[in-house]
Image (cartoon, grey):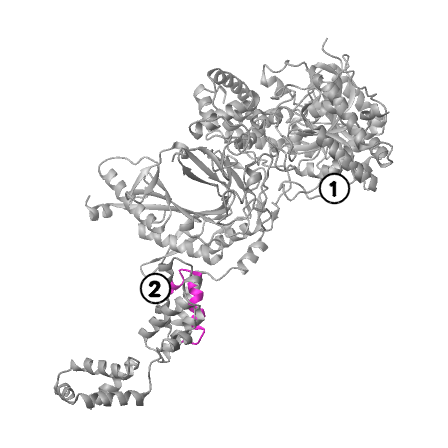
């Protein structure tokens, strides 16, 4: 059994750890061994932390022996390299932070430590969370465990792949325009983006401040509920973090979705979609009906403007958030005779092409003479998009859609044309603009065996209904989960 | 705004504002990329937003404030640990000309 | 240039932008200490160093102090105000943007009164808002060294309308603004310590014109004196240029106090596109009517009111009241001093304005350290009032008190400065002097009035200098005139 410990879910591992059937160190070692075996092919991690992980596991075992077993005690997690983890290199997949050692823990990292979790490593991602494929990493792309010639999705590709390949029991990612949900969909795992402001952003390297949100990748919906409970809650260090009390999300998993109204937006089922994806999602919707839910056709009329809105708002905020990377107080510095050259060369050398592109776009959108036409305009359209959802939630409790128009595409397939890559965010991006919770749930596989994800969107702070519906579907057996065979390139 | 083509001069100006030194081939590529993106973004002008308030944030209203207390103990060394160049407890940069 | 013609033809249009450090214990957005004297970068943390992942959290007291200033300057306090990011690159600006306020500031409008033709004249304000300060650079050889202790310190920025017309008015405005900052407790506002900085916008236009001329901005002024000098110089310079048919380019200038001239700033850094947008990490600041009422109720007494009180209660002139209320500490010193039961308010005011202020100005120390306690100074003045010592003796005693820190009575006793006001004793001394100089008495009575001084001097000598001068005068006159 010990060789297969990495197959456990959090809920299962929690039971066995508490009953001392297995030790945290055994569990962690099983994951570390799996990482050692697979990493060369997957590249899900930028930094693996075997020493720290085993120390944490030993401490967890001591607590378990004392009968002190917080929710995540001894559970091995991968942490997207966007979270500051004290004493451990935190790069955000960028050369400009290639040597940066975090001097403090992000709030959620401190909470996970409190909860006894084990961090096996810092997961790969698109540089500064900008991307949908994890190909924009300064440390090489992460490959999809279901097909190593394909992307794992992004920007949290490493976290998704690590969970799918069972290198850890769960992982932490971030989602700004779909960066948890899309890779979850491509890698066949559960990915949860909570309501904006549900979880603290302190210590999460900022991309777009009004859109970024912390969230978990897990194997099951129950595990996601367990993780969310530990992550959520107010933080005096984050002025945008909600003080609303955190419910016991596990308790919401009653299995009963009788009468639940699920909105199906007509704008999300248009031509150009991969027919297998559409078929899989529609089948899942029929399954929800058979479980007692009611499908309601709704309209989100401003869907088509979401990508344009996002790529102005997010890049504008990002252009300011990334101004601090200047070679003066930390990170890469390219030496120069004067400060202007120091800035210019450090940033030119330290940032990758996609990051530069977005900084340029964002700077332009805020610049004198263009602010009204771009930034202000986009924020106004954002209001329209939010209102679409407010109106929809008057008629339904949840909204269901595909996560992505396709399954995982091939490495290099979309890198030539930035717009092509941006357009793949079409189903996830509105959710961030409206600040809503969204969850990606495996609902099938295409002919090539690639995973397909169903997105469930909740009302603000409506994670309980969202998780309950997803859990009910998952337990109905409608989608038989397959573990990736980890086939190499043909 | 029918022609959303951005000029090379605009690209250079924005690069100066953003402190990004661009190689000549980068300038051309960015000009193309940004023009394409701005052309796409232009569709926002199909919408009449004259009466619509902008959304600066999606969270709850009213900023939480903290009490005026000194919480951080004096600590220069750990804050300088990642400094690319330093002199004693200062961060060191090329001479600033006013 | 013919000065009088030019000043008739042209008028100066001046606006001032003042940045003052708020007197909070901690910084605006983090829990680092806000204060002086620490070693470089000792008062820093990931937040005020702009490290990856950090977020700002607003200091409640800073908001309260800013609102106090707004109320004291008769501004409208906005119920909702918005923080904004102001982007530019500079080594002492850690995030590459400053969190400030732009479209919706905390305080709007308002005015500050300056003395004018015996009354007051309001200088209108555009706004007052809050923002964080940047760090400091010092230059050493080929390098600059950056210290972020000041990064994140809270500032209020007070922007006036261009209502000011002369350098003297600008100085008066700065004095009045500084007094408000100190009285409200918002800021210590000491230019020498760098917590009160002033930028000046100057333009000129033909007298009677309503249009604004092209303006220049003068930065780096760290004393009120320099502000006056710089304005005087720049106004004259602009008039020269325009009178000769030239134009004034809009530029930023530095004041060089050594050469007494303005020169353009070398770097184009400040010709910036700040790309302001609302700060997404801070929700709008919502100030309720209750909060404003609470702050107004807790407001310390302000200079204008205090001046009124002094004129009304103690019969001081507007000028005297003005000097005494320049500083809250000085005004308190004056009232505490009177509390010993003095009746000669004018004399007390004069003493504070001359003897006490001189100590402060010469020593460069704050009032509490430079001068004896108000109660002791009051006791000394009471001795003068009671006739126990002469004015000159009091000055000697005061100087000694400053050095020794001892009480008034102890000092006067030790130095033997008590004067004699006993009528009989004085009469005795007069008699003795008159007896000794009968011939001179005769000459005096015959008309040589000038000899009176000789007699006064002799009586004083007879009394070892301790005679009450006024009484000596009166009694001697009576005896001599017969």
Looking at the rendered structure, which numbered label has been put on residue C170?
Answer: none
Give the main secondary structure of the magenta stretch.
helix
Characterize the local packing of mark 1: few (<14), some (14-19) or many (20 or more) Cα atoms within 10 angstroms.
Answer: some
Question: Is C157 drawn above or below residue A438 in the view shown?
Answer: below
Q: Which mark is residue A246?
A: 1
- In the drawing, what numbered circle is on residue C319? 2
Q: Chain of mark 2?
A: C
Q: Quadrant of the C terminus of chain B?
A: top left
Above or below, A358 against C70 in this view is above
Say which residue appears at 40% left-offset and 50% top-offset: C192
Q: Nearer the viewer, residue C121 or B87?
A: B87
Asked if residue C210 lies left or right of residue A171, the reply is: left
* Secondary element at image label 1: loop
C115 horizontally vs A61: left or right: left
Using the image, name the chain to which the residue with label 1 belongs.
Answer: A
Residue C119: x and y in percent read 34, 61
Callout 2: SS: helix
- On the image, the x and y values in percent for residue A429 come to 65, 27
Q: Position of residue C159 (x, y in %)?
A: 42, 46
Whether residue C211 is visible: no
Between the C-alphas of marks 1 and 2, the distance is 64 Å
User: Which region shows up in magenta?
Assistant: C318-343
């Amino acid at each position: 059994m010990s060789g297969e410990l990495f197959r456990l879910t959090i809920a299962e591992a929690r039971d066995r750890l508490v009953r001392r059937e297995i030790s945290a160190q055994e569990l962690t070692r099983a994951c570390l061994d799996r990482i050692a075996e697979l990493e060369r092919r997957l590249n899900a991690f930028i930094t693996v932390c075997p020493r720290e992980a085993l120390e944490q596991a030993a401490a967890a075992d001591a607590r378990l022996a004392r009968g002190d077993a917080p929710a995540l005690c001894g559970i091995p997690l991968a942490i997207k390299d966007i979270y500051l983890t004290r004493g451990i290199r935190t790069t955000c997949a960028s050369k400009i932070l290639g040597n940066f050692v975090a001097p403090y823990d992000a709030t959620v990292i401190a909470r996970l430590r409190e909860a006894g979790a084990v961090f096996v490593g810092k997961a790969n991602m698109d540089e500064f969370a900008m991307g949908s494929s994890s190909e924009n990493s300064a440390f090489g792309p992460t490959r999809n465990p279901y097909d190593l010639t394909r992307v794992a999705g992004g920007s949290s590709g490493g976290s998704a792949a690590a969970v799918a390949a069972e290198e850890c029991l769960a992982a932490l990612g971030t989602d700004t325009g779909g960066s948890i949900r899309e890779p979850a969909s491509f890698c066949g795992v559960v990915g949860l983006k909570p309501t904006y402001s549900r979880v603290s952003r302190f210590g999460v390297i900022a991309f777009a401040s009004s859109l970024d949100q912390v969230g978990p990748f897990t194997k099951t919906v129950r595990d996601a509920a367990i993780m969310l409970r530990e992550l959520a809650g107010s933080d005096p260090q984050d002025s945008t973090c909600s003080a609303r009390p955190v419910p016991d999300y596990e308790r919401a998993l009653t299995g009963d979705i009788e009468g639940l109204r699920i909105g199906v937006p007509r704008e999300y089922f248009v031509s150009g979609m991969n027919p297998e994806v559409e078929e899989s999602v529609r089948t899942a919707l029929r399954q929800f009906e058979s479980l007692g839910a009611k499908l309601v056709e709704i309209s989100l009329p401003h869907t088509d403007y979401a990508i344009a809105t996002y790529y102005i708002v997010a890049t504008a905020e990002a252009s300011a958030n990334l101004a601090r990377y200047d070679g003066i107080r930390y990170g890469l510095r390219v030496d120069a005779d004067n400060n202007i050259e120091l800035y210019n060369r450090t940033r030119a050398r330290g940032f990758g092409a996609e990051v530069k592109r977005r900084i340029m776009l964002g700077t332009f959108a805020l610049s004198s003479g263009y602010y009204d036409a771009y930034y202000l305009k986009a924020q106004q359209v954002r209001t329209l998009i939010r209102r679409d959802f407010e109106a929809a939630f008057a008629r339904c409790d949840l909204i269901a859609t595909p996560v992505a128009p396709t399954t995982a595409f091939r490495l290099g397939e979309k890198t030539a044309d930035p717009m092509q890559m941006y357009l793949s965010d079409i189903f996830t991006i509105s959710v961030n603009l409206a600040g809503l919770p969204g969850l990606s749930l495996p609902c099938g596989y295409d002919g090539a065996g690639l995973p397909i994800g169903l997105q469930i969107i909740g009302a603000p702070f409506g994670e309980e209904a969202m998780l309950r519906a997803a859990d009910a579907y998952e337990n109905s057996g409608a989608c038989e989960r397959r573990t990736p065979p980890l086939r190499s390139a043909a | 705004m029918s022609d959303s083509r951005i000029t090379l001069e605009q690209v250079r100006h924005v690069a100066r504002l953003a402190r990004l030194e661009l190689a000549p081939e980068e300038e051309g590529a960015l000009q193309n990329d940004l023009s394409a993106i701005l052309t796409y973004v232009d569709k926002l002008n199909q919408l009449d937003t004259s009466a619509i308030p902008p959304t600066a944030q999606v969270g709850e209203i009213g900023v939480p404030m903290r009490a005026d207390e000194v919480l951080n103990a004096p600590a220069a060394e750990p804050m300088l640990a990642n400094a690319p160049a330093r002199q004693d407890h200062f961060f060191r940069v090329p001479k600033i000309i006013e | 240039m013919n000065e009088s013609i030019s000043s008739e033809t042209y008028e100066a249009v001046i606006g001032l932008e003042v940045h003052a450090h708020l007197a909070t214990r901690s910084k605006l957005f983090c829990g680092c200490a806000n204060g002086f004297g620490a070693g470089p970068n000792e008062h820093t943390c990931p937040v005020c160093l702009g490290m990856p992942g950090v977020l700002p959290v607003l200091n409640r007291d800073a908001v309260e102090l800013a609102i106090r200033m707004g109320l004291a300057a008769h501004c409208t306090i906005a119920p909702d105000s918005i923080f904004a990011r102001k982007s530019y690159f500079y080594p002492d600006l850690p995030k590459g943007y400053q969190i400030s306020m732009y479209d919706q500031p905390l305080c709007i409008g308002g005015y500050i009164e300056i003395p004018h033709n015996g009354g007051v004249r309001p200088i209108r304000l555009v706004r007052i808002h809050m923002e964080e300060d940047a760090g400091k650079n010092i230059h050493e050889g080929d390098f600059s060294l950056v210290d972020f202790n000041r990064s994140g310190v809270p500032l209020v920025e007070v922007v006036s309308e261009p209502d000011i017309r002369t350098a003297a008015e600008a100085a008066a405005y700065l004095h009045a603004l500084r007094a408000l900052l100190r009285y409200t407790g918002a800021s210590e506002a000491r230019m020498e310590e760098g917590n009160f900085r002033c930028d000046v916008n100057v333009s000129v236009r033909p007298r009677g014109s309503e249009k604004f001329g092209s303006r220049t901005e003068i930065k780096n002024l760290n004393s009120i004196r320099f502000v006056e000098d710089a304005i005087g110089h720049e106004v004259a310079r602009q008039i020269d240029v325009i009178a000769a048919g030239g134009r004034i380019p809009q530029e930023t200038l530095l004041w060089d106090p050594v050469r007494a001239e303005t020169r353009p700033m070398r770097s184009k850094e400040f010709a910036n596109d700040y790309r302001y947008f609302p700060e997404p990490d801070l929700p709008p600041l919502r100030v309720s009517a209750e909060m404003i009422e609470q702050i107004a109720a807790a407001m310390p007494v302000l200079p204008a009111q205090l001046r009124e009180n002094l004129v009304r209660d103690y019969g001081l002139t507007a000028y005297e009241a003005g000097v005494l209320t320049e500083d809250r500490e000085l005004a308190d010193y004056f009232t505490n001093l009177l509390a010993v039961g003095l009746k000669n308010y004018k004399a007390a005011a004069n003493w504070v304005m001359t003897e006490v202020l001189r100590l402060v100005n010469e020593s460069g120390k704050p009032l509490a350290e430079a001068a004896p306690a108000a109660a002791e100074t009051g006791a000394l003045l009471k001795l003068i009032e009671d006739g126990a010592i002469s004015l000159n003796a009091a000055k000697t005693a005061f100087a000694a008190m400053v050095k020794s820190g001892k009480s008034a009575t102890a000092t006067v006793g030790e130095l033997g400065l008590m004067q004699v006001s006993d009528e009989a004793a004085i009469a005795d001394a007069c008699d003795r002097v008159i007896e000794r100089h009968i011939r001179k008495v005769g000459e005096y009575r015959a008309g040589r009035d000038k000899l009176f001084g000789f007699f006064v001097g002799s009586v004083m000598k007879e009394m070892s200098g301790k005679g009450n001068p006024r009484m000596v005068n009166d009694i001697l006159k009576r005896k001599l005139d017969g």
